[in-house]
Image (tube, grey):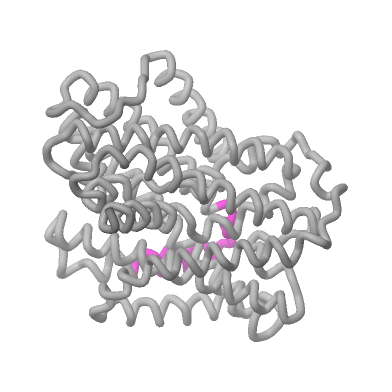
Amino acid sequence: METKRRNFFSAVFTLVGTIIGAGVLGLPYVFAQSGFLIGAFWLIFLGVVMTFLNLWIGEITLRTKQIHQLTGYAEKYLGKTARNIMLIAIIIGVYSALLAYLIGEGQSLSRLFFGNTGYAFLFGLVFWGVMAILLQGGLSRLKSLEFWSVIFILAALFFSFLFLLPDVNKENLVQTNFTNVFLPFGIVLFALLGFNSVPELTREIGKNRKMLKKVIIIGSLIPIVSYLMFSFVIVGVLGGSVSEVSTISFSGLFGKLLILFGIFTMMTSFFVLSFALRDSFIFDFNKKKFSFLYVSIVPLLLYLFVSFFDLAGFVRILGLGGVISGGLTGILILLMVRKAQIKGDVKPEYSIPINWFIIAILTLIFVVGIFLEVF
Protein backbone atom coordinates (compact mmCIF):
# COMPACT_ATOMS: atom_id res chain seq x y z
CA MET A 1 0.00 0.00 0.00
CA GLU A 2 2.84 2.37 0.89
CA THR A 3 4.60 1.68 -2.42
CA LYS A 4 1.38 2.28 -4.32
CA ARG A 5 0.85 5.64 -2.57
CA ARG A 6 4.47 6.63 -3.20
CA ASN A 7 4.20 5.76 -6.89
CA PHE A 8 0.97 7.73 -7.12
CA PHE A 9 2.44 10.95 -5.71
CA SER A 10 5.65 10.47 -7.67
CA ALA A 11 3.66 10.24 -10.90
CA VAL A 12 1.51 13.27 -10.00
CA PHE A 13 4.60 15.39 -9.31
CA THR A 14 6.23 14.23 -12.53
CA LEU A 15 3.29 15.62 -14.50
CA VAL A 16 3.04 18.79 -12.40
CA GLY A 17 6.79 19.36 -12.72
CA THR A 18 6.61 18.98 -16.49
CA ILE A 19 3.68 21.37 -16.87
CA ILE A 20 4.69 24.09 -14.41
CA GLY A 21 7.62 26.00 -15.84
CA ALA A 22 8.55 29.49 -16.88
CA GLY A 23 5.24 29.87 -18.71
CA VAL A 24 3.72 30.94 -15.39
CA LEU A 25 5.90 34.07 -15.47
CA GLY A 26 4.26 35.31 -18.67
CA LEU A 27 0.64 34.62 -17.75
CA PRO A 28 0.03 37.74 -15.60
CA TYR A 29 1.21 39.99 -18.45
CA VAL A 30 -1.22 38.62 -21.04
CA PHE A 31 -3.98 38.47 -18.40
CA ALA A 32 -3.40 42.15 -17.66
CA GLN A 33 -3.41 43.09 -21.35
CA SER A 34 -6.66 41.27 -22.13
CA GLY A 35 -8.32 41.55 -18.75
CA PHE A 36 -8.06 39.03 -15.93
CA LEU A 37 -11.50 37.54 -16.60
CA ILE A 38 -10.66 36.87 -20.25
CA GLY A 39 -7.32 35.34 -19.28
CA ALA A 40 -9.01 33.21 -16.62
CA PHE A 41 -11.53 32.00 -19.20
CA TRP A 42 -8.75 30.82 -21.54
CA LEU A 43 -6.87 29.21 -18.65
CA ILE A 44 -9.90 27.22 -17.52
CA PHE A 45 -11.12 26.38 -21.03
CA LEU A 46 -7.72 25.30 -22.38
CA GLY A 47 -6.98 23.64 -19.03
CA VAL A 48 -9.97 21.36 -19.54
CA VAL A 49 -8.96 20.69 -23.16
CA MET A 50 -5.37 19.86 -22.18
CA THR A 51 -6.54 17.62 -19.34
CA PHE A 52 -8.58 15.59 -21.82
CA LEU A 53 -5.62 15.47 -24.23
CA ASN A 54 -3.41 14.18 -21.40
CA LEU A 55 -6.06 11.56 -20.60
CA TRP A 56 -6.20 10.52 -24.25
CA ILE A 57 -2.40 10.13 -24.32
CA GLY A 58 -2.69 8.00 -21.20
CA GLU A 59 -5.31 5.87 -22.92
CA ILE A 60 -3.01 5.46 -25.93
CA THR A 61 -0.21 4.19 -23.66
CA LEU A 62 -2.61 1.75 -21.99
CA ARG A 63 -3.80 0.43 -25.37
CA THR A 64 -0.23 -0.16 -26.59
CA LYS A 65 1.97 -3.06 -25.49
CA GLN A 66 5.25 -1.22 -25.92
CA ILE A 67 6.11 2.07 -24.25
CA HIS A 68 7.04 4.80 -26.72
CA GLN A 69 7.47 8.54 -26.69
CA LEU A 70 5.01 10.72 -28.61
CA THR A 71 6.92 10.32 -31.87
CA GLY A 72 6.78 6.53 -31.51
CA TYR A 73 3.03 6.50 -30.88
CA ALA A 74 2.50 8.84 -33.84
CA GLU A 75 4.41 6.49 -36.13
CA LYS A 76 2.61 3.39 -34.82
CA TYR A 77 -0.89 4.74 -35.32
CA LEU A 78 -0.54 7.40 -38.03
CA GLY A 79 2.65 6.59 -39.96
CA LYS A 80 6.08 8.14 -40.56
CA THR A 81 4.75 11.47 -41.83
CA ALA A 82 2.89 11.99 -38.56
CA ARG A 83 6.03 11.00 -36.65
CA ASN A 84 8.03 13.68 -38.48
CA ILE A 85 5.35 16.32 -37.86
CA MET A 86 5.30 15.38 -34.18
CA LEU A 87 9.09 15.67 -34.03
CA ILE A 88 8.98 19.11 -35.67
CA ALA A 89 6.28 20.25 -33.23
CA ILE A 90 8.33 19.10 -30.24
CA ILE A 91 11.52 20.74 -31.51
CA ILE A 92 9.71 24.04 -32.16
CA GLY A 93 8.32 23.95 -28.63
CA VAL A 94 11.70 23.24 -27.05
CA TYR A 95 13.68 25.81 -29.04
CA SER A 96 11.09 28.55 -28.53
CA ALA A 97 11.18 27.84 -24.79
CA LEU A 98 14.99 27.88 -24.61
CA LEU A 99 15.08 31.16 -26.55
CA ALA A 100 12.44 32.75 -24.30
CA TYR A 101 14.30 31.61 -21.18
CA LEU A 102 17.53 33.24 -22.39
CA ILE A 103 15.62 36.51 -22.86
CA GLY A 104 13.81 36.17 -19.52
CA GLU A 105 16.95 35.25 -17.56
CA GLY A 106 18.83 38.19 -19.08
CA GLN A 107 16.12 40.64 -18.03
CA SER A 108 15.78 39.10 -14.56
CA LEU A 109 19.51 39.06 -13.80
CA SER A 110 19.94 42.62 -15.07
CA ARG A 111 17.03 43.79 -12.91
CA LEU A 112 18.37 41.92 -9.89
CA PHE A 113 21.90 43.38 -10.04
CA PHE A 114 21.32 46.81 -11.60
CA GLY A 115 17.66 47.60 -10.95
CA ASN A 116 16.89 47.84 -14.68
CA THR A 117 16.99 45.71 -17.84
CA GLY A 118 19.75 47.68 -19.58
CA TYR A 119 22.21 44.78 -19.37
CA ALA A 120 19.71 42.06 -20.26
CA PHE A 121 21.46 41.00 -23.47
CA LEU A 122 24.84 40.54 -21.75
CA PHE A 123 23.34 38.65 -18.83
CA GLY A 124 21.53 36.42 -21.31
CA LEU A 125 24.89 35.54 -22.84
CA VAL A 126 26.40 34.87 -19.40
CA PHE A 127 23.49 32.60 -18.50
CA TRP A 128 23.87 30.73 -21.79
CA GLY A 129 27.60 30.23 -21.13
CA VAL A 130 27.03 28.84 -17.64
CA MET A 131 24.32 26.46 -18.82
CA ALA A 132 26.41 25.34 -21.82
CA ILE A 133 29.21 24.37 -19.42
CA LEU A 134 26.88 22.59 -17.00
CA LEU A 135 25.24 20.61 -19.78
CA GLN A 136 28.61 19.10 -20.71
CA GLY A 137 28.96 17.55 -17.27
CA GLY A 138 27.37 14.50 -15.76
CA LEU A 139 24.46 16.36 -14.22
CA SER A 140 21.74 13.87 -15.06
CA ARG A 141 21.59 13.04 -11.35
CA LEU A 142 20.03 16.45 -10.79
CA LYS A 143 16.87 15.09 -12.39
CA SER A 144 16.25 13.35 -9.08
CA LEU A 145 15.78 16.82 -7.56
CA GLU A 146 12.67 17.40 -9.68
CA PHE A 147 10.38 16.54 -6.77
CA TRP A 148 11.93 19.19 -4.52
CA SER A 149 11.97 21.72 -7.35
CA VAL A 150 8.22 21.25 -7.78
CA ILE A 151 7.68 21.62 -4.03
CA PHE A 152 9.71 24.84 -4.02
CA ILE A 153 7.87 26.34 -7.01
CA LEU A 154 4.43 25.48 -5.62
CA ALA A 155 5.41 26.88 -2.21
CA ALA A 156 6.72 30.09 -3.80
CA LEU A 157 3.50 30.54 -5.81
CA PHE A 158 1.38 29.97 -2.70
CA PHE A 159 3.51 32.35 -0.59
CA SER A 160 3.24 35.03 -3.28
CA PHE A 161 -0.54 34.60 -3.28
CA LEU A 162 -0.80 35.02 0.49
CA PHE A 163 1.64 37.95 0.59
CA LEU A 164 -0.03 39.95 -2.20
CA LEU A 165 -3.67 39.07 -1.53
CA PRO A 166 -4.31 41.96 0.95
CA ASP A 167 -3.16 44.50 -1.69
CA VAL A 168 -5.39 43.24 -4.51
CA ASN A 169 -7.48 45.98 -6.12
CA LYS A 170 -10.75 44.56 -7.43
CA GLU A 171 -10.92 47.19 -10.18
CA ASN A 172 -7.76 45.75 -11.75
CA LEU A 173 -9.51 42.40 -12.06
CA VAL A 174 -12.73 43.49 -13.76
CA GLN A 175 -11.24 45.67 -16.51
CA THR A 176 -11.35 44.01 -19.94
CA ASN A 177 -9.86 44.76 -23.35
CA PHE A 178 -11.72 42.79 -26.00
CA THR A 179 -9.25 43.84 -28.71
CA ASN A 180 -6.79 41.50 -26.96
CA VAL A 181 -9.29 38.72 -26.36
CA PHE A 182 -7.10 36.09 -28.08
CA LEU A 183 -3.78 37.37 -26.70
CA PRO A 184 -3.57 34.87 -23.81
CA PHE A 185 -4.24 31.83 -26.03
CA GLY A 186 -0.66 31.00 -26.99
CA ILE A 187 1.04 31.64 -23.64
CA VAL A 188 -1.71 29.75 -21.77
CA LEU A 189 -1.32 26.81 -24.14
CA PHE A 190 2.45 26.86 -23.64
CA ALA A 191 2.08 27.01 -19.85
CA LEU A 192 -0.15 23.91 -19.89
CA LEU A 193 2.05 21.70 -22.08
CA GLY A 194 3.01 18.44 -20.40
CA PHE A 195 2.36 15.85 -23.10
CA ASN A 196 5.85 14.36 -23.09
CA SER A 197 5.67 13.17 -19.49
CA VAL A 198 2.48 11.08 -19.81
CA PRO A 199 4.21 7.98 -21.26
CA GLU A 200 6.66 8.22 -18.35
CA LEU A 201 3.74 8.15 -15.89
CA THR A 202 2.74 4.72 -17.19
CA ARG A 203 6.20 3.44 -16.27
CA GLU A 204 6.17 5.10 -12.83
CA ILE A 205 2.89 3.58 -11.68
CA GLY A 206 4.03 0.10 -12.74
CA LYS A 207 1.31 -2.52 -12.29
CA ASN A 208 -1.12 -0.03 -10.74
CA ARG A 209 -2.36 1.06 -14.14
CA LYS A 210 -5.89 1.76 -12.89
CA MET A 211 -4.70 4.87 -11.07
CA LEU A 212 -3.29 6.51 -14.21
CA LYS A 213 -6.55 8.37 -14.88
CA LYS A 214 -6.59 9.88 -11.39
CA VAL A 215 -2.90 10.77 -11.62
CA ILE A 216 -3.46 12.65 -14.88
CA ILE A 217 -6.51 14.53 -13.62
CA ILE A 218 -4.87 15.69 -10.38
CA GLY A 219 -1.54 16.39 -12.06
CA SER A 220 -3.29 18.53 -14.69
CA LEU A 221 -5.50 20.45 -12.22
CA ILE A 222 -2.74 21.52 -9.81
CA PRO A 223 -1.00 23.75 -12.39
CA ILE A 224 -4.32 25.32 -13.47
CA VAL A 225 -5.19 26.31 -9.89
CA SER A 226 -1.64 27.51 -9.20
CA TYR A 227 -1.57 29.65 -12.36
CA LEU A 228 -4.97 31.14 -11.54
CA MET A 229 -3.93 32.11 -7.99
CA PHE A 230 -0.60 33.62 -9.11
CA SER A 231 -2.13 35.62 -11.96
CA PHE A 232 -5.00 36.77 -9.73
CA VAL A 233 -2.74 38.50 -7.22
CA ILE A 234 -0.19 39.87 -9.71
CA VAL A 235 -2.85 41.45 -11.94
CA GLY A 236 -4.93 42.43 -8.92
CA VAL A 237 -2.03 44.40 -7.43
CA LEU A 238 -0.36 45.84 -10.54
CA GLY A 239 -3.15 46.07 -13.11
CA GLY A 240 -1.82 46.94 -16.56
CA SER A 241 1.74 47.66 -15.37
CA VAL A 242 2.81 44.01 -15.27
CA SER A 243 6.09 43.30 -17.09
CA GLU A 244 6.35 40.51 -19.67
CA VAL A 245 8.44 38.59 -17.15
CA SER A 246 6.05 39.24 -14.28
CA THR A 247 8.54 38.58 -11.50
CA ILE A 248 10.57 41.71 -12.39
CA SER A 249 7.52 43.93 -11.83
CA PHE A 250 8.08 44.47 -8.10
CA SER A 251 10.71 46.35 -6.09
CA GLY A 252 12.10 46.01 -2.59
CA LEU A 253 12.97 42.80 -0.78
CA PHE A 254 9.87 40.98 -1.98
CA GLY A 255 10.69 42.07 -5.53
CA LYS A 256 14.18 40.59 -5.28
CA LEU A 257 12.83 37.35 -3.84
CA LEU A 258 10.30 37.18 -6.67
CA ILE A 259 13.06 37.77 -9.23
CA LEU A 260 15.11 34.96 -7.67
CA PHE A 261 12.05 32.71 -7.91
CA GLY A 262 11.72 33.57 -11.61
CA ILE A 263 15.43 32.95 -12.20
CA PHE A 264 15.22 29.55 -10.51
CA THR A 265 12.08 28.56 -12.40
CA MET A 266 13.54 29.47 -15.80
CA MET A 267 16.89 27.88 -14.96
CA THR A 268 15.37 24.52 -13.98
CA SER A 269 13.08 24.59 -17.04
CA PHE A 270 16.01 25.44 -19.31
CA PHE A 271 18.10 22.67 -17.81
CA VAL A 272 15.42 19.96 -18.03
CA LEU A 273 14.47 20.86 -21.62
CA SER A 274 18.10 21.00 -22.71
CA PHE A 275 18.87 17.64 -21.16
CA ALA A 276 15.80 16.06 -22.75
CA LEU A 277 16.74 17.49 -26.14
CA ARG A 278 20.34 16.34 -25.78
CA ASP A 279 19.27 12.81 -24.84
CA SER A 280 16.87 12.71 -27.78
CA PHE A 281 19.61 13.60 -30.26
CA ILE A 282 22.01 11.10 -28.67
CA PHE A 283 19.72 8.11 -28.20
CA ASP A 284 16.98 8.59 -30.79
CA PHE A 285 19.05 9.98 -33.66
CA ASN A 286 22.56 8.78 -32.76
CA LYS A 287 23.90 12.34 -33.00
CA LYS A 288 26.13 12.42 -29.91
CA LYS A 289 28.91 14.12 -31.84
CA PHE A 290 26.69 17.07 -32.75
CA SER A 291 24.49 17.18 -29.63
CA PHE A 292 26.29 20.28 -28.27
CA LEU A 293 25.65 22.06 -31.57
CA TYR A 294 21.93 21.29 -31.51
CA VAL A 295 21.34 21.89 -27.80
CA SER A 296 23.59 24.87 -27.06
CA ILE A 297 24.77 26.59 -30.25
CA VAL A 298 21.38 26.70 -32.00
CA PRO A 299 19.64 28.47 -29.06
CA LEU A 300 22.56 30.91 -28.88
CA LEU A 301 22.30 31.75 -32.58
CA LEU A 302 18.54 32.21 -32.24
CA TYR A 303 19.10 34.50 -29.24
CA LEU A 304 21.66 36.60 -31.11
CA PHE A 305 19.43 36.86 -34.18
CA VAL A 306 16.24 37.77 -32.28
CA SER A 307 18.07 40.24 -30.02
CA PHE A 308 19.99 41.93 -32.81
CA PHE A 309 16.88 42.54 -34.93
CA ASP A 310 14.60 43.03 -31.89
CA LEU A 311 12.11 40.57 -33.39
CA ALA A 312 10.18 39.36 -30.37
CA GLY A 313 10.02 39.36 -26.60
CA PHE A 314 9.57 36.78 -23.87
CA VAL A 315 5.78 36.46 -24.14
CA ARG A 316 5.64 36.58 -27.94
CA ILE A 317 8.12 33.72 -28.30
CA LEU A 318 6.38 31.56 -25.69
CA GLY A 319 3.03 32.27 -27.37
CA LEU A 320 4.29 31.25 -30.79
CA GLY A 321 5.93 28.13 -29.41
CA GLY A 322 2.80 27.26 -27.47
CA VAL A 323 0.31 27.46 -30.34
CA ILE A 324 2.53 25.82 -32.94
CA SER A 325 3.93 23.03 -30.77
CA GLY A 326 0.84 22.53 -28.62
CA GLY A 327 -1.58 22.92 -31.53
CA LEU A 328 0.13 20.48 -33.86
CA THR A 329 0.73 17.97 -31.08
CA GLY A 330 -2.86 18.27 -29.89
CA ILE A 331 -4.26 17.60 -33.37
CA LEU A 332 -2.06 14.54 -33.79
CA ILE A 333 -3.10 13.21 -30.36
CA LEU A 334 -6.77 13.49 -31.35
CA LEU A 335 -6.12 11.43 -34.49
CA MET A 336 -3.89 8.96 -32.64
CA VAL A 337 -6.39 8.12 -29.91
CA ARG A 338 -9.18 7.63 -32.46
CA LYS A 339 -6.99 5.14 -34.30
CA ALA A 340 -5.79 3.49 -31.09
CA GLN A 341 -9.37 2.90 -29.93
CA ILE A 342 -9.91 0.91 -33.12
CA LYS A 343 -6.54 -0.82 -33.56
CA GLY A 344 -4.97 -0.82 -30.11
CA ASP A 345 -3.03 -3.85 -28.84
CA VAL A 346 -4.73 -4.36 -25.46
CA LYS A 347 -7.85 -3.34 -23.54
CA PRO A 348 -7.11 -0.21 -21.45
CA GLU A 349 -7.94 0.39 -17.80
CA TYR A 350 -9.98 3.43 -18.84
CA SER A 351 -11.33 4.92 -22.04
CA ILE A 352 -12.40 8.50 -22.81
CA PRO A 353 -15.02 8.75 -25.58
CA ILE A 354 -14.08 10.68 -28.71
CA ASN A 355 -15.72 11.13 -32.10
CA TRP A 356 -15.12 13.04 -35.29
CA PHE A 357 -17.22 15.98 -34.12
CA ILE A 358 -14.98 16.48 -31.07
CA ILE A 359 -11.88 16.06 -33.24
CA ALA A 360 -13.17 18.63 -35.75
CA ILE A 361 -14.10 21.23 -33.08
CA LEU A 362 -10.81 20.96 -31.17
CA THR A 363 -8.78 20.91 -34.39
CA LEU A 364 -10.56 24.08 -35.51
CA ILE A 365 -9.74 25.75 -32.17
CA PHE A 366 -6.05 24.86 -32.52
CA VAL A 367 -5.88 25.98 -36.16
CA VAL A 368 -7.57 29.31 -35.40
CA GLY A 369 -5.24 29.78 -32.42
CA ILE A 370 -2.18 29.18 -34.60
CA PHE A 371 -3.47 31.58 -37.27
CA LEU A 372 -4.24 34.37 -34.80
CA GLU A 373 -0.94 34.03 -32.95
CA VAL A 374 1.19 33.95 -36.09
CA PHE A 375 -0.60 36.60 -38.14
- Out of 177 and 224, give the one closest to the viewer: 224
- Out of 182 and 170, give the one closest to the viewer: 170
Position of residue 359 measured from the top left corner of the image (x, y, whole percent): 40, 21
Position of residue 295 measured from the top left corner of the image (x, y, whole percent): 31, 66
Magenta residue check for 304: yes
Name the main secondary structure of what is drawn in magenta.
helix
Residue 347 left/right relative to 320? left
Residue 264, compared with residue 312, is above or below; it is: below
Residue 308, compared with residue 82, is above or below; it is: below
Position of residue 232 measured from the top left corner of the image (x, y, whole percent): 71, 52
- Specify start and end residues of the magenta stretch as a single range: 297-316
- Out of 213 and 237, give the one closest to the viewer: 213
Outermost residue, front direction?
Answer: 1
Identity of the residue drawn at 53% across and 33% down: 369
Q: Quadrant of the C terminus?
A: top right
| Residue 26 seen in the figure | yes
Residue 328, picture quadrant: top left
Magenta residue check for 105: no
| Residue 102 seen in the figure | no
Residue 47 left/right relative to 351? right
Residue 86, compared with residue 366, is above or below; it is: below
